[in-house]
Amino acid sequence: MDLIIQNNANLFPRDQIRIEQLEVAPYPDGRRVKVITQITPFRERPNLDIAIFDADGARVASSSVIGAMTFKLELNLHLRGDTPPEGTFSVRVKLYFDDIDAPQDAKQAQFHIEPSASGNE
């Protein structure tokens, strides 16, 4: 299997792996968020740190992917908190191999949750 992976011209070496696309889609309930990440086709499996922050910069959801198996990942994150979420949020994804504090690539996206979507009416 390693021979096939290492000799596949469509797969890139570790130093060329990047986050190619980041999509964010909040669910109508306002509590869950779908995060879709597309990564450069890789030979070595990268790690991802995914976090959602509210407008004040507080972390309201997070997830880690250790040794990603696929080039496209779809995760559903649940927003924490006692009150229904509303307003502007940002998603940050870090791609790294050895050190989470020294990511090889990072992307960020924003999304908005309307008060009616989170059940405040």
Image: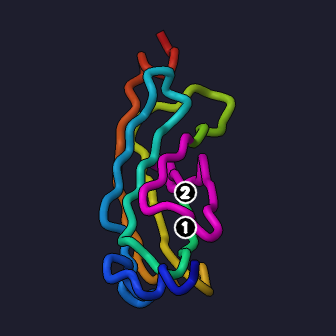
Q: Position of residue 74 (x, y in %)?
A: 48, 47
- The answer to whether residue 43 is left or right of residue 101 is left
In the rendered image of this protein, does residue 13 appear above or below residue 58?
below
Q: Nearer the viewer, mark 2 or mark 1?
A: 1
Q: Quarter of the image containing the N terminus?
A: bottom right
Q: In the picture, residue 39 is in which quadrant?
A: bottom left
Instruction: Find the distance from the CA under tag 2 to the CA under tag 1.
Output: 10 Å
Identify the residue under disc 2. 51
Question: Which disc number belongs to residue 32?
Answer: none
> Residue 13: x, y in percent?
41, 88
Residue 26 image offset from top left, x and y in percent = 42, 34
Between residue 12 and residue 78, name the one nearer to us: 12
Q: In this view of the protein, which residue sits in the foreground, 113 or 74?
A: 74
**Which residue is at the far right?**
82
Task: Name the residue type under label 2.
Answer: Ala
Task: For mark 1, give the secondary structure.
Answer: strand
Is the residue marked by circle 2 packed among few (<14), some (14-19), or many (20+) residues within 10 Å? Answer: some
User: Residue type at mark 1?
Assistant: Leu
- The mark found on residue 48 in the picture is 1
- Asked if residue 53 lies in the magenta stretch, the reply is yes
Q: Residue at x 59, y 53 (%)?
A: 59
Is 102 drawn above or below residue 79 in the view shown?
below
Q: Which residues are magenta?
A: 51-76
